[in-house]
Image: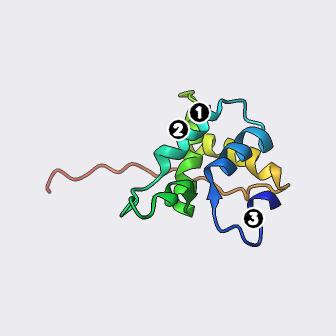
């Protein structure tokens, strides 16, 4: 993971995303799938005529959406929830740096019925 965080490297780029997903994490997918998820997770760039280079940089919120989009693209099964799909993606990515996810208890919310009086 050191490759993605060098002292003078300020951002996570599109090339880094393709490298991380395909080479390092070992997802069997085409680079076009990764680039699709990248592009769809990007926010609008204000004054893109002057700041066009921001399309190749990713903010943390964009990275989170990138992971969610990648999860839905890689695991299209309706049997898994979005949370489970994201967990599968995170497990593979965190294995690159020899980390594991902190398991969080999942609580289901009870559905309440509204009163007819309102």
Q: Would residue 1 be seen by someone viewing this image from the given angle?
A: no
Considering depth in this image, is 80 or 109 the residue closer to the camera?
80
Mark 3, secondary structure of its residue: loop
Q: What is the x, y in percent for residue 86? A: 62, 45
The residue singled out by tag 3 in the image is: 5
The residue singled out by tag 2 in the image is: 36
Furthest toward the right, the residue is 98
Q: Residue at x 59, y 48 (%)?
A: 67
The answer to whether residue 49 is left or right of residue 104 is left
Q: Residue at x 47, y 44 (%)?
A: 40
Q: Which mark is residue 32?
A: 1
Q: Is residue 62 above or below residue 24?
A: below
Say which label, 3 or 1, has the lower sequence index: 3
Say which label, 3 or 2, has the lower sequence index: 3
The residues tagged by marks 2 and 1 sit, at their Cα atoms, a distance apart of: 6 Å
Does the CB distance between marks 3 and 2 fall below 8 Å?
A: no
Considering depth in this image, is 88 or 46 the residue closer to the camera?
46
């Amino acid at each position: 993971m050191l490759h993605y965080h060098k002292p003078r490297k300020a951002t996570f780029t599109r090339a880094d995303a393709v490298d991380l997903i395909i080479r390092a994490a070992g997802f069997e997918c085409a680079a076009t799938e990764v680039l699709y998820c990248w592009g769809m997770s990007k926010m609008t760039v204000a004054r893109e005529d002057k700041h066009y280079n921001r399309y190749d940089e990713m903010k943390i919120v964009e990275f989170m959406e990138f992971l969610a989009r990648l999860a839905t693209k890689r695991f299209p099964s309706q049997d898994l929830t979005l949370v489970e799909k994201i967990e599968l993606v995170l497990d593979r990515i965190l294995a690159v740096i020899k980390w594991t996810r902190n398991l969080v208890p999942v609580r289901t919310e009870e559905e309440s019925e509204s009163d007819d009086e309102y």
